[in-house]
Structures are given as structure tokens and as C-alpha cells.
Image: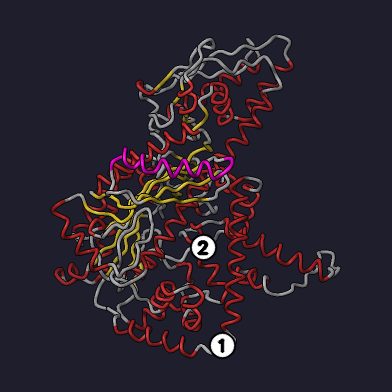
């Protein structure tokens, strides 16, 4: 069944025959149809925004969706996704009813308007440029494989709680970016997950960009691992074909940087972006600068392949009958009324294979807003929330200083533990950029939300400044001119970052919406991973509680949240049982697990238990069972010392001298020591994540 089939069920009675062959009653059929449709659409929704990633053509996505469905069922994440899917289904029902009404009226005026717009677009078609989109293949994973070549031919991913990228071996199993780590392990039990090393990736990105600059000094970085180039001048000056030039560029990157890149070559940026995904990994694809070639390519292209069409928009389009870009033209009379003017323009330009040809450094585009946000475990303490708010204000001040702007409007964004999102905004008497001002103007908004919403518990908090003004005197004229030329009286759209207006194309808003969708998916996957860790912790506590001989308060070294493992200044020892720690330390501290890298409560017992659970759940159960069976109470003794100059990690299990369990504990101690050595390079957790191919 396709998504379209599922949505069609919403508008018609469905006859359903039971597996036994007995026909159900009409009432049962009507009840079963929408329920089946709902589960089908939800399972498709749970596949996530990375479904179109390269390397998954042979993957049974139905099986993957079933595994994700079962693994996440019962979680807050699942409940939230279920609610969103129901809301989308309701919206689609409304769209279909509206379409049914439009089919009864005369739409000739709408058709003429659409045809006139198409004619004007054709006049603007530019086939003179060679635009290239460069995309590093599984960038994070590829960089890690340089240092560890043995990982090239085994399933491997970067990211522990949530995967940021996977190599192509892992993708064969259905693993992909923005997937919870424990779900990926269900798909591929042998998957190797490495922690992220942003310094290493940034250094490699600089190497790649140095080569790109030789082909287009004004290339545009779209993210750390992708870029747009206009190589028209390079091809003319070097008398070289664009395909040969890109082949040369890719070879140079491979030889000098030891990673591979894929490329798309087309008359505009939109098509080049699509083409770069055609022959991944380590390949390239070109659409000739010819109208017939462009139209032939675009007509058969699924709309989901277009940058700017996310999961939600895809389902809405599919519901009315638009599956490929070639289908758009037939519905041109409906689009403006169903989806609005901007969507109408975006879709008509897409159907013609049109897009921007201008490429320039990203910092030359006008920013509409600058913002930062972070996810965390549920917080209800007013003190903790204010500390989070102050920290967010400090981070935003750094971001605004980096791009030399101040904001006239300040926006507060929060997400409740129920996944509901609220935003509030204020216009300060003057443009703001300092952390103190950002905090002072946002605090009343947070306080008001606390009073308005019962059981106020947050899992995300963010601040954003919009309606920006420059703090660089020499750039004042530039910003004023950009604002005058690019604005048409419309208020700017609130986005965390915006790359500016692409000439006259509305693509940026749709691309930004798709980016937001992917980022939201990453945040929610992290939350799902945290929920799973909490459930595992509860299961472990139930096992551990069966014996009273286990002393979980043995001293051990641990990592404070955000600290590097080998940083003596940030390593703390637990207080003695007779010492009461300050309340502030209890509420603020989080210690990163050296195995899974997820932050754990700053509690001796919980943290020690969690480390044991990560290492070997079965070994723990066996050890506890042996202690229960023993008449000689076991004792805890710290046995583990971090390797490679790392901090000591004391870790205890119930042991009995000269018993089999002692041998198991020693084996586990060796595993822990080895794991500690492997964790030496692990840095602090990063809240901002990117998606890579």
C-alpha cells in the first residue's frame, strides 16, 4: 500500500476481509480501514527524513519501519509522533475536502494565471551556467576511517545516542543518520558506533575547501561537508568540459584529503543538488544545459527528491495525486488555493527544473535571524530553567558576535515534556546582543509560561534574534542595500539561520523548513534514546534490588557533563556518605557515560549501575544471581583504572574470593579498562548536530 492509498481510505468506506476469509460487518470494516491507514502512515512517518539517503536502494523499508515502530512503541517519542501523524491526517482530510469542492467550480481563471506564470518563468530560464553541488560521502565516517581503515568494510556509524552518519556498509542494513542508536543496533547488531570528533571533521573540511577554492574562489558552503560552485569561468579559462573539470576536482580531493566526494552538475543549484545524490558514493552525474534534457529528467523525479519537500509536504502532495514533478503541471489550477502562493511558485518552478544560478559565499547573504537551542532531560526546577536560559543567552551572544549583528526582536522557544512547542517574542526598546540583555528580556516570557502551563517541564529551550542590524560600521551600507533590495514589505520568516534570498526564487523558505524538519527529527531521536536508557536503568535497578549485599556507593572516577575524560580540572571524586553536597551541584551536574556518551544523573548509584548495564547486562545478572546463591556476602572493590593516561574509573561488582564470579568480574574489569582507553578521545557532548550523506 502506498501513502496515497492510505490517504484515499480516509475518504471512502473500506471493505475488509479477515484472514479467516469471513467478511467483516460494515461497521467493523469502517473502523478497521482508518485504523490500518493510520498505522501505515505512522510507520512511514517513523522512517524519518533521511529515508532518501543514498545506499539504501536494496533495503526493505517496510521491515525497517516495523522495527522502528516496535522499538519506539510506548515511549513519549512514539506518542508525540502518533499525535503529529493524526494531525497531519486530519489536515490532509481537510485538503481533500477542499479539493473536492474546487473540482465543482470553474477554475479557468486559475489555469490562465498559472499558464501566464509558467510563460514568464520560461523567459527567465538560464542555460548558460555550470553549477556544481559537491557532497562528501559519509563525511564523518570517512574521516574516522582514515585513522581506522579496518572500519571501511564493516558497518560503522558516528554518534552513539543518535547517529549523525553511517558508512555505506551500515546503510545496507537500513541504518541512517538521525536514527536512535539502539534502533540501529536492532537493525544491525554488529554496528560499530564511534563518538564524534568535531575538531577532526573541521580540519578535514578546511582541506577540502582549499581545493574547491581553486575552481571557484566564491564557492558557497552549504554545510561542513557540502558546497555549491559555479565553474563556468573556470571551464572557459581552462578550456575544459564541466564533467572533466569535476572529475579532476574529485580526483584531487581523493588524493590529497583521502576521502571521496560525489558531485552533481546542472544548469542551476536546485538540479545540481539532486544530481549529486544520483551516483553516490564517489560518482558524478550531469544534466546537460539543454531544456529537453532538463524536462526529461525532472518529469520522472519523485517530489521527495527535491530539496525543500519534506515528509509532511510529500504526504500532502501525494494525497492530491502529485507523486512526481511531472504530475505538478496537471494540478496547477489547484495549487495556489490548496497550499498558498509561495508553495504554488515553488512547485511550478520545480516542475520546470528551474532554480538559482548565482553562487556566492554564505556570509554574503543577508541573515534573517540568529538563534541557538538545546535539548536536555526533562527539567521542572525553576532554578535549573533559569540557569539553562542564562547559558542559552551566553551562547547566543557568541553567535551574534561571530556574525556581527544585533536583534530588534527576541524570540523564546520551549518544548514541553509532552513535545508541545511554544514560542513567545518581545521587542526590546533597543537592539540587543549581550547575554545580560538577552536573559533579562527573555526571563519574563519564561516566567509567564510557567504560570500559564500546569506541570511546566521542559526538554528544549532556545533563543533567537530576528530583524537584525549590523554592528560593523563598514558594513552598514551593505546591509541597508541588501534589506532594501530583498524585502518587499513582508516580515522575515523566523528561522534559526537563513542563507538569504536566492535571487527571485522562493526555494530558501522551503529548504529551511526541510532543514528544520531534519533537525527536529534529530532532537526527537536523541530524546527517544534517552528514554530507552531510562527504561534500561529501571530494569537494571529491579534486578539489583533483589540483593542487599551489593554496595553501589564504592568510590569511582567519573566525567562531569561536558568534560573531556582526561581533564584533571574537570574530574571530581564523590563525596563521602557523611557529607551533604550543595543543592546546586546535585541539580546541575550530569556525568557522561564513557560507553554510550549519554549524560546520566549525578548520583553515585545510578551512574555506577548505568556503566555496568552498558558493559554487559547479562554478566551483571549472572553476578547478582551468584551473590544471592552465596551464603558469604560479597563485597565491592574498585578494580578498574583508566588506560592511556585517563582518569581512574572505579567500578565494583559483588565478588567472592576464589569464586567463578570473581573471574567474570575480572573479565569485565578488563573490558571496562579497554573501553576506557577507547574513550580517551571523547569530547564534551555537542547540542548542535548536522546531517550528512
Spatial CA span between label 1 and label 2? 30 Å
Q: Is residue 58 above or below residue 14?
A: above
For the N terminus, the image quarter is bottom right
User: Circle 2 — which element?
Assistant: helix
Marks 1 and 2: CB-CB under 8 Å?
no
Main SS of residues in magenta = helix
Indicate left or right for 176 with 474 as reference.
right
In this view, the residue in front, 441 or 29, is 441
Image x and y of residue 327, in percent: 50, 79
Query: Residue 539, percent across and down?
Result: 66, 32
Residue 682 spot, x, y in % from top left: 40, 33
- The image's colour scheme reads secondary structure
Residue displayed at 30% across by 52% down: 408
The residue wearing badge 2 is: 311
| Residue 431, image x, y percentages | 27, 49
Residue 572 lies, with reference to residue 48, above or below; the image says: above
Dividing the picture into quadrants, the one containing residue 292 is bottom left
- The numbered disc on residue 163 is none
Magenta stretch in the rendered image: 434-455
Residue 652 in magenta stretch:
no
In terms of secondary structure, where does tag 1 sit?
Answer: loop
According to the image, label 1 marks what residue?
A: 105
Amino acid at each position: 500500500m502506498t501513502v496515497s492509498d492510505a490517504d484515499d481510505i480516509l475518504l471512502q468506506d473500506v471493505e475488509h476481509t479477515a484472514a479467516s476469509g469471513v467478511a467483516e460487518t460494515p461497521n467493523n470494516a469502517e473502523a478497521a480501514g482508518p485504523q490500518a491507514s493510520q498505522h501505515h502512515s505512522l510507520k512511514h512517518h517513523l522512517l524519518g527524513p533521511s529515508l532518501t539517503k543514498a545506499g539504501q536502494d536494496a533495503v526493505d523499508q517496510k521491515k525497517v519501519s516495523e522495527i522502528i515502530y516496535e522499538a519506539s512503541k510506548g515511549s513519549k517519542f512514539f506518542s508525540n509522533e502518533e499525535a503529529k501523524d493524526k494531525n497531519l491526517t486530519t489536515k490532509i482530510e481537510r485538503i481533500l475536502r477542499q479539493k473536492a469542492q474546487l473540482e465543482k467550480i470553474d477554475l479557468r481563471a486559475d489555469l490562465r494565471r498559472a499558464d501566464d506564470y509558467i510563460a514568464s518563468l520560461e523567459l527567465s530560464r538560464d542555460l548558460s551556467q555550470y553549477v556544481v553541488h559537491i557532497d562528501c560521502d559519509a563525511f564523518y565516517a570517512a574521516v574516522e576511517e582514515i585513522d581506522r581503515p579496518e572500519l571501511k568494510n564493516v558497518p560503522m556509524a558516528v554518534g552513539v545516542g543518535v547517529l549523525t552518519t553511517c558508512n555505506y556498509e551500515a546503510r545496507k542494513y537500513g541504518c541512517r543518520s538521525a536514527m536512535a542508536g539502539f534502533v540501529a543496533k536492532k537493525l544491525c547488531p554488529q554496528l560499530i558506533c564511534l563518538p564524534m570528533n568535531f575538531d577532526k571533521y573541521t580540519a578535514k573540511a578546511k582541506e577540502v575547501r582549499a581545493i574547491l577554492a581553486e575552481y571557484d574562489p566564491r564557492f558557497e558552503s552549504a554545510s561542513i561537508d557540502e558546497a555549491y560552485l559555479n565553474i563556468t569561468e573556470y571551464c572557459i579559462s581552462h578550456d575544459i568540459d564541466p564533467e572533466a573539470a569535476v572529475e579532476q576536482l574529485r580526483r584531487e580531493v581523493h588524493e590529497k584529503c583521502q576521502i571521496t566526494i560525489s558531485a552533481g552538475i546542472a544548469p542551476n543549484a536546485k538540479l545540481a543538488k539532486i544530481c549529486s545524490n544520483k551516483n553516490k558514493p564517489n560518482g558524478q552525474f550531469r544534466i546537460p544545459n539543454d531544456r529537453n534534457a532538463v524536462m526529461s529528467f525532472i518529469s520522472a523525479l519523485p517530489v521527495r527528491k527535491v530539496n525543500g519537500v519534506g515528509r509532511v509536504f510529500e504526504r500532502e502532495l501525494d494525497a492530491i495525486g502529485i507523486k512526481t514533478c511531472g504530475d505538478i503541471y496537471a494540478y496547477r489550477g489547484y495549487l495556489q488555493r490548496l497550499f498558498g502562493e509561495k508553495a504554488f511558485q515553488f512547485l511550478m518552478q520545480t516542475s520546470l527544473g528551474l532554480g538559482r544560478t548565482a553562487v556566492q559565499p554564505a556570509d554574503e547573504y543577508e541573515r534573517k535571524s540568529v538563534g541557538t537551542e538545546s535539548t536536555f532531560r526533562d527539567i521542572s526546577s525553576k532554578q535549573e530553567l533559569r540557569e539553562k536560559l542564562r547559558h542559552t543567552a551566553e551562547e547566543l551572544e557568541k553567535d551574534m558576535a561571530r556574525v556581527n549583528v544585533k536583534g530588534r526582536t527576541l524570540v523564546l522557544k520551549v518544548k514541553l515534556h509532552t513535545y508541545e512547542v511554544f514560542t513567545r517574542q518581545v521587542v526590546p526598546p533597543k537592539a540587543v546582543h549581550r547575554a545580560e540583555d538577552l536573559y533579562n528580556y527573555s526571563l519574563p516570557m519564561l516566567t509567564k509560561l510557567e504560570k500559564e502551563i500546569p506541570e511546566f517541564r521542559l526538554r528544549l529551550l532556545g533563543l533567537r534574534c530576528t530583524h537584525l542590524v549590523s554592528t560593523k560600521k563598514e558594513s552598514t551600507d551593505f546591509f541597508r542595500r541588501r534589506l532594501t533590495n530583498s524585502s518587499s514589505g513582508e516580515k522575515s520568516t523566523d528561522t534559526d539561520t537563513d542563507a538569504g534570498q536566492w535571487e527571485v526564487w522562493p526555494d530558501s523558505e522551503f529548504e529551511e523548513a526541510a532543514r528544520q524538519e531534519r533537525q527536529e527529527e534529530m532532537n526527537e531521536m536523541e530524546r527517544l534514546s534517552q528514554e530507552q536508557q531510562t527504561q534500561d536503568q529501571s530494569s537494571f535497578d529491579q534486578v539489583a534490588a533483589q540483593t542487599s549485599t551489593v554496595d553501589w556507593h564504592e568510590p569511582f572516577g567519573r566525567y562531569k557533563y561536558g568534560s573531556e575524560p582526561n581533564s584533571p580540572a574537570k574530574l571530581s571524586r564523590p563525596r563521602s556518605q557523611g557529607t551533604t553536597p550543595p543543592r546546586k551541584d546535585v541539580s546541575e551536574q550530569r556525568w557522561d557515560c564513557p560507553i554510550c556518551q549519554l549524560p546520566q544523573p549525578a548520583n553515585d548509584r545510578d551512574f555506577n549501575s548505568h556503566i555496568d548495564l552498558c558493559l554487559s547486562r547479562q554478566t551483571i545478572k549472572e553476578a547478582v544471581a551468584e551473590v544471592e546463591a552465596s551464603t558469604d556476602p560479597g563485597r565491592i572493590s574498585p578494580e578498574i583504572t583508566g588506560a592511556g593516561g585517563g582518569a581512574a574509573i572505579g567500578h565494583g561488582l559483588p565478588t567472592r574470593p576464589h569464586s567463578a564470579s570473581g573471574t567474570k568480574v575480572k573479565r569485565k574489569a578488563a573490558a571496562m579498562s579497554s573501553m576506557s582507553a577507547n574513550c580517551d578521545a571523547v569530547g564534551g557532548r555537542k547540542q548542535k548536530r548536522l546531517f550528512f550523506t
